[in-house]
Each structure stands twice: as structure tokens, then as C-alpha cells.
Amino acid sequence: MNPTGLDLPPLAAAFVFGLLGGAHCIGMCGGIMSALSFAVPPSLRHPVRLGGLLLGYNLGRIASYVLAGALAAGLGTLVGLAPGVRLALQVLAATMLILMALYIADWWKGLLRLEALGKRLWRRLEPLGRRLMPVVTVPQAMALGAVWGWLPCGLVYSMLTWSLASADPLRGAALMGAFGLGTLPALLATGLAARRLGGLIRHPATRTLAALTIIGFALWQLWGLWPGAMPHEAGHAGQH
């Protein structure tokens, strides 16, 4: 029995979305990852030590995503009790995935407006992150990652709407955790200066493939919400 109550496809999809969004993650967090690397004195700049700091930072960041997912899903339980509202949240989640895809492919930057909504909170949190610099220990790196996880990000906000629509804190936390794990390869590669992988992730063809994949999944989600399109969904709905 799956303790999250989620079938594998949603968790796998969330992981893939994080993986495909790597190009955007490099742009948003690549600077801080490089700063973590250069903050370590040259005499201590050993690959194992750097790897530990970068992994600690990312674990802290993902922990913030998990918390945000649980909070969003908790809100979903309050507003999504009526069937009509629940359906509207699911449509919103699929729509946000499409907007996220357009954002990743550089076809439309409307999500930047959504990021602006989180700047007020970020202005309060950023000073806390700066006090943790320079990072020389793993606990420091984890604490910094936990703060940086709240950086305004349209990609994260898009995924949070999926958690919101789940209306289940455990499901929402699991979705955001899977998404966060998906972002790991790109950010670890940036921090460890893996230029080839970073270049591949940022390549326009990679961005386009990622966007089309996400759009395809979102359309499949919307099709599943169409009355009578996927009869087996009724069985799942009864579990919520």
C-alpha cells in the first residue's frame, strides 16, 4: 500500500517536471550554488566537501518545498470541499502546468507576474539567508537551503497548485518532495561546475522537449476531468 495515497504516475510526473525544469532552476539558483562552492577556502575545496555542502543546501531547499506542499494542500482541504470547487482547482493545476511549460521554453513569461506576488515574503527572508553566508558547514548549508526554498519561483508556484488541488497534506508534501528531487541533477551539476550537463539542460531543444512533455501531461489531466472521458477516475474520486 502506498502510504502517500498517490499512484506512481503523479509522483513520477512531479519528479520529471523538476528534472525538465532544470534550465529554469539553474537561472534562479545557479548563482547561490556557485557562491557555496567559492565560499569554501581553496585549501578545503575538496570534491567530497563541496558535494556535502551542495547536497545539504538542496536537502534544505527540498524540505521547504515539502512544507509548502503540505501547507498548500491543507488550504485545499478548506476550499475544495465542494465538488465544483475541487474540479476548478484541478483545472487550475493543469492550466498552471501549461503556463510552466511556456515559461521553461521561453515562449511566454507571464509567470514572472506570479513570482512578483512572493517578493514581499522574500524581502523578509533574504536577510536571514545572507547571515548564513559564507557557508562552511553542512548544517549551515541546510539552513540556507531551507531559506532559499522560499525564493519566488513561478515553477514552484505552478507545482504548488497541483498540491493545492490534491487537498491532502501528505499528498501535497509528497508531490513537492518528488518535484524537488527532480531539480537536484541540474543544481548539483551547476554547483560542481559540470558544464556539459549544464549546457545540455539549457539548450533550446531540451527546453522545447521539456515544455511539450509537460503540456502533453497537462492536456491528459484536463481530458481526464472531462465527464465520461476516464470512467476509472470515479473510483479514485471516492477515495478522497
Image: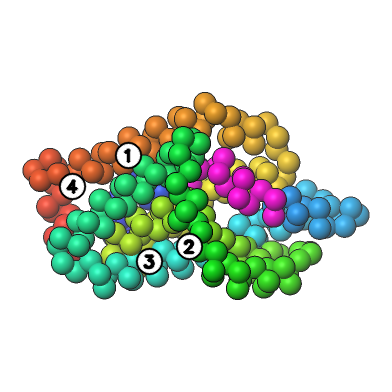
Which circle's residue, 3 or 2, is located before the other in the chain?
A: 3
- The image quadrant where one finds the C terminus is bottom left
Amino acid at dot 1: Phe
Tell me if I can see residue 128 in this picture: yes
Q: Categorize mark 2 by other alpha carbons within 10 Å: few (<14), some (14-19), many (20+).
A: few
Stretch in magenta: 16-32
> From where the camera sits, is residue 170 visible?
no
Horizontally, is 186 left or right of 94 in the view?
right
How many numbered circles are shown?
4
Q: Is the magenta region chiefly helix, strand or loop?
A: helix
Q: CA distance from mark 4 to mark 1?
A: 13 Å
Res. 225 mark:
4
Q: CA distance from mark 3 to mark 1?
A: 21 Å
If you read the primary sequence from the N terminus, does the residue marked by circle 4 or circle 1 appear first?
1
Identify residue for label 1. Answer: 217
Residue at 63% in and 52% down? 29
Q: Position of residue 117 (x, y in %)?
A: 48, 62
Q: Secondary structure at mark 3?
A: helix
Element assignment for label 2: helix
Q: Which mark is residue 72?
A: 3
Which comes before the other along the chain, label 4 or label 2?
2
